[in-house]
Image (tube, rainbow, N blue to C red):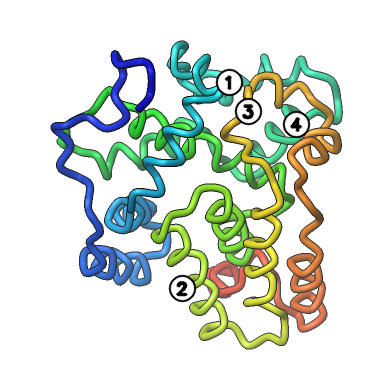
Amino acid sequence: MFMDQAIPLCDPARTDSGFRPMKALHHFRKLIADKEDTEQVFHIIEALRDNRFAKSAEHFFATPTGKQILSKNEYLPHLLDDHERLRKFPMGSVAHAYCDFMEKEGLTSQGLVDEFEKFQKDKPRYNDMLERYSNRLRDTHDLFHVLTGYGRDALGEQCVLAFSYSLNPSWGVLLLAWAGARELKKTVSTDAPIYAAVREGQCLGRLAKSAAHQDIEALLAMPLADARKQLNIGEPVTYKRAHAIMRGEGIDPYDLLGVQKAAA
């Protein structure tokens, strides 16, 4: 049991626990119908959460870094969305790469929180480790893209989910990664190694250390190459090969479903 009794691992009043595959299937179908409906992702992850999540949270918050983070209860989007502050870090740092990525994609850390709030709606909030750990994983998702080299293309999203699963096991995340890969195979005519790229992401994640378990401000200050080395994040060779094959086939990896072409 965690030594700080003021913040329980799991609030006894929680009612959102339990393994509910039929609920996950319902929300997965809604996600397939509208792939931009990010709210469904949170429903799926919650419905397939098992005791491994609680074990991961308890283990992390028992570490020196975890104890410090638990005590500070920092709100990461305030730091991650302060690009003026992050741009003061040296060129070549994780901070600069993160700002470049977020600005290019038109994203904010708070934007993902806002999507999460649609899922939460009128649900009760709990001041426990599970809630704080869940928020930390959510808030570092786009940082994982930067550190792993996986883009926000359809394949890159499945790969970063597979990578994340190996670090923080969740049946919901695994379902999203592999079901998403299957959807790509069904809808895109390509010889690119879709499944192999996702499998590679899962394997790379097994060897890596989690960015969510680090002091984020210290990590942002590091040169990107050094951060990848410290976290033992390998090169996504198969993912890059998949992109090269698709481009050779005249397919834009960032527009696999031809949305931009259809709108042109």
Q: Residue flagged by tag 1: what amino acid is it?
A: Thr
- Tag 3–tag 4 contact (CB < 8 Å): no
Label 4: how many residues lie within 10 Å, few (<14), some (14-19) or many (20+)?
many
Q: Which residue is mark 4?
A: 94
- Pointer 3 local density, CA inside 10 Å: few below 14, some 14–19, many at least 20: some
Q: Mark 1 = which residue?
A: 65
Instruction: Give the Cα separation between the discs numbered 2 and 1.
Output: 34 Å
On the image, the x and y values in percent for residue 204 come to 70, 57
Q: Residues within 10 Å of mark 1 (few under 14, many from 20)?
A: some
Residue at x 53%, y 55% (from the top left corner): 165
Which one is in front in this view, the residue at disc 3 or the one at disc 4? 3
- Element type where label 4 sits in the image: helix
Image check: 223 left or right of 243? right
Looking at the picture, which amino acid does disc 3 mark? Gln
Q: Quadrant of residue 55?
A: top left
Question: Label 4 sits on what residue type?
Answer: Val
- Residue 226 placed where, x, y %? 85, 34
Name the residue that disc number 2 marks. Answer: 179
Cβ atoms at labels 1 and 3 below 8 Å apart:
yes
225 relative position to 18: left or right: right
SS at badge 2: helix
Q: Which residue bears the numbered disc 3?
A: 214
Mark found first going from the N terminus, 3 or 2: 2
Q: Earlier in the sequence, mark 2 or mark 1?
A: 1
The amino acid type found where label 2 is placed reads Ala
What residue is shown at x 38% (from left), y 24% (from top)? 2
